[in-house]
Amino acid sequence: MVTGTAVRSAYGPGTETLLSGVLSGRPAFAPVQRFDVSARRARFAAAMAGSPQLDAEVAHTIREACDDAGLAASDRARTPLFLAVHGDPAAPRAAAAGRPAPGPQAFAASAAHACGLAEQDLRCYMSACVAASSAIGDAAAIIARGLADRVVVAGGYLVEPDQFALFDAGRVLAGDGQVRPFSAGRRGLLLGDGVGAVVVESGEAARARRALPLVRIAGWGRGGDAYHPCQPRPDGQGLARAITAALRRAGAVAAGLGYINAHGSGTAASDPAEANALRLALGEATETVPVSSTKSLHGQALEASGVLELIVTLLALRKGMLPVNAGYLGADDGCGLRLVLDEPLATDAELAMSLNCAFGGANTALVVGLP
Amino acid sequence: MTGPEPLAPISLGALLAAATEAGLRALSAAAWPEESADDEVPPLAGFIESAFSPLLAEVAARALRRRPGPTVPGTVTAIVMVTAFGDTASATRVAAAVDAGKRVSPLLFFQSVPNAVAGYLAARWDLTGPVVCVSGMSAGLGIAALLIDDGDADEALVIRIDLAGAGDGLDRGAALLVTRPDRNVPITA
């Protein structure tokens, strides 16, 4: 069960702000002000105002999620943290200056300490764009197996100059300032701020605290492409295996899904591969299950994507309104899906899926259901 | 599972003991360096300016070549990378270029996350399982066991890499191919 959430995105702090932002259908992309991009080809990202610091934002968000879940200090002290980040943000410049860098594990330990969480069983996930979704799947699996009764999973990425320069060098950033997943004329991805945290716990642990579950994590699956260092497998087999495993664990059939928040990066190679994966795993249901990629609205939050997008998915499910797939210009023959276009779609769906893919052919699928 | 681990030179014996403690059976093991000839990590095409990816590919290949017997068709192998600091050499290069107002090499984008070399390994050795990267060995072994128990993998290649700047001045790596003692039959997902 998920009993608490908190989030920060380019739309601002808070789940209500995020939900109203994505349901507005207005993408949060703007010219980057946070640092100098004059030497870059691309200019846009989805960033919140000011100069937020990752350590402070992560700690605030974790505390808010614990507050949302109603966790007492004694509960927090027994709860481990799984944190998804690219690494210790201070490390590259500390190393160059000959200073010792604490490293990602210490960064995560500092966040756990600041939030009164357990010092034991801490994990730091650094698996690129599936880091947070892997952590959520692992937390759900550990709890389902009775190895823990509660885990706080958090992820954080704030748009910064190093990753912006790398993605710019890789020529994957959309020069037109819009992310257009599954659309003709798509030009690439755009980075976006995302810091999210969820409290995941067993039904028994939630009941014992009289905590009301927001959603249940019904299924999870992971699969690899075995294809290329950074290109997705075109036939989508790795992602299809992850989707199939997640549905099997959820005890669900494809037609039972009421929404899919797709990985939908908006790049030329990734979107058709994902569409193929959906057709492989879901069959005819691909023609009826509504799909959107909310990266077209809040951007690509890298290691934090999985938790940001899971929160968007559960908020949409609870609200009964599905966000649009923004930036759409027209059909692409390789990406035939039932996209949510033009305006949010009202739904009475009780089950939804969030997909994430990463370099290395890493794929995850998470299925959430109303409790 | 345990708390934060101090970074210490890699001991293959200690890793094997930790794997056993995590309820895993090691099918094969490898390290870098293993012998006096291990003084320069073999280069890996497409990966530049850092020993991280070449070293990871080398120790992984050693462990996979030492697998006892042929691979059973359909075996699903996860890749679990463990690194206390990540690819500090690449990250430092990128930071220096950014601070100098320069463009960075597109090749550095392709190796900007540990997943990239995992993708190379997966394609080279047909490893179709999940790809994960974490910062602690106890977490890595726990994830390997969980992925196998969950049925998302039959076995896991757990690879630890520490670059020179992170420890005692030497690039070091180790890889264990592990499974659960009771798992003999490949899954078909």
Image: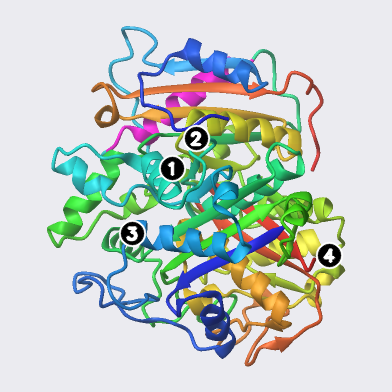
Tell me residue A165's x, y (percent). 28, 62
Q: Would you say residue B72 sits in the magenta stretch?
A: no
> Circle 2 is placed at which residue position?
B81
Q: Earlier in the sequence, mark 1 or mark 2?
A: 2
- Callout 4: residue from which chain? A
Tag 4: Cα neighbours inside 10 Å, few (<14), some, or many (≥20)?
Answer: some
The residues tagged by marks 3 and 4 sit, at their Cα atoms, a distance apart of 36 Å
> Circle 4 is placed at which residue position?
A254
Looking at numbered disc 3 in the image, what kind of residue is underneath it?
A: Gln
Secondary structure of the residue carrying numbered label 3: helix
The residues tagged by marks 2 and 4 sit, at their Cα atoms, a distance apart of 32 Å
Tell me residue A154's x, y (percent). 52, 55
Tag 1: Cα neighbours inside 10 Å, few (<14), some, or many (≥20)?
Answer: many
Which residue sits at x=30%, y=63%?
A: A160
Which of the 4 image quarters holds residue B19?
top right
Looking at numbered disc 4 in the image, what kind of residue is underneath it?
A: Ala
The residues tagged by marks 4 and 1 sit, at their Cα atoms, a distance apart of 33 Å
Report the magenta residues as a range. B50-67
- The answer to whether dots 2 and 4 both sit on one chain is no
Q: Disc 1 vs disc 2: Cβ atoms closer than 8 Å?
A: yes
- The answer to whether dots 3 and 4 both sit on one chain is yes
Above or below residue B141? Residue B11 is above
Tag 2: Cα neighbours inside 10 Å, few (<14), some, or many (≥20)?
Answer: many
For the question of whether residue A157 can be seen, the reply is: no
Q: Disc 2 vs disc 3: Cβ atoms closer than 8 Å?
A: no
Secondary structure of the residue carrying numbered label 1: loop
Looking at numbered disc 2 in the image, what kind of residue is underneath it?
A: Met
Which residue sits at x=60%, y=72%?
A: A312
> Circle 1 is placed at which residue position?
B114
